[in-house]
Image (spheres, helix red, strand yellow):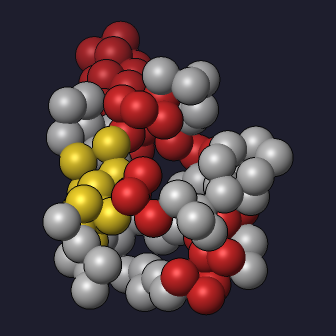
Amino acid sequence: MKRIAIAAAAMAVAMMAAQAMAVPAGKTVEWPTSMGKVTFKGDDHAGKGLKCNECHTKIFKMKKGSTQMKMADINAGKYCGECHNGKRAFKPAGNCAKCHKK
């Protein structure tokens, strides 16, 4: 019985770690765009005190490539624009080079 409890606890910890690290430390997610590549760095956001579950799955799905973002959506307060609204974080409009790198 003790072995089952230990195995269950280990499995729960492994599942939580996998969820918390959708973009593991030091890794990135990239989107090619006509304005240049956009790179999301989980470390940058974690460094600001944000937790993965603040955006996943409330704003973004967990599956890579499942969200088709458009700048019009972001500027309208969807996706990245939920926080990047000029109040909580920089507003994307007029700050293209902060995200888009040629």
Using the image, determine if residue 11 lies above or below residue 89: above
Residue 54 % position (x, y): 64, 46
Residue 10 % position (x, y): 31, 23
In terms of image quadrants, where is residue 56? bottom right
| Relative horizontal placement of residue 36, taking residue 4 as reference (left or right) | left
Using the image, determine if residue 68 lies above or below residue 28: below
Q: Nearer the viewer, residue 91 or 8?
A: 91
Q: Which residue is drawn at 62% across and 69% down?
A: 93
In terms of image quadrants, where is residue 43? top left
Using the image, determine if residue 55 lies above or below residue 57: above
Judge whether residue 21 can be spotted in this image: yes
Judge whether residue 78 can be spotted in this image: no
Q: Nearer the viewer, residue 57 or 70?
A: 70
Q: Which residue is drawn at 58% across and 45% down?
A: 53
Residue closest to the far top = 2
Residue 50 % position (x, y): 59, 32
- The quadrant of the picture occupied by the C terminus is bottom left
Q: Which residue is drawn at 81% across and 46% down?
A: 87
Q: Nearer the viewer, residue 99 or 94?
A: 94
Using the image, determine if residue 19 lies above or below residue 17: below
- The quadrant of the picture occupied by the N terminus is top left
Q: Residue at x 58, y 65 (%)?
A: 94
| Relative horizontal placement of residue 82, taking residue 98 as reference (left or right) | right
Residue closest to the far front = 94
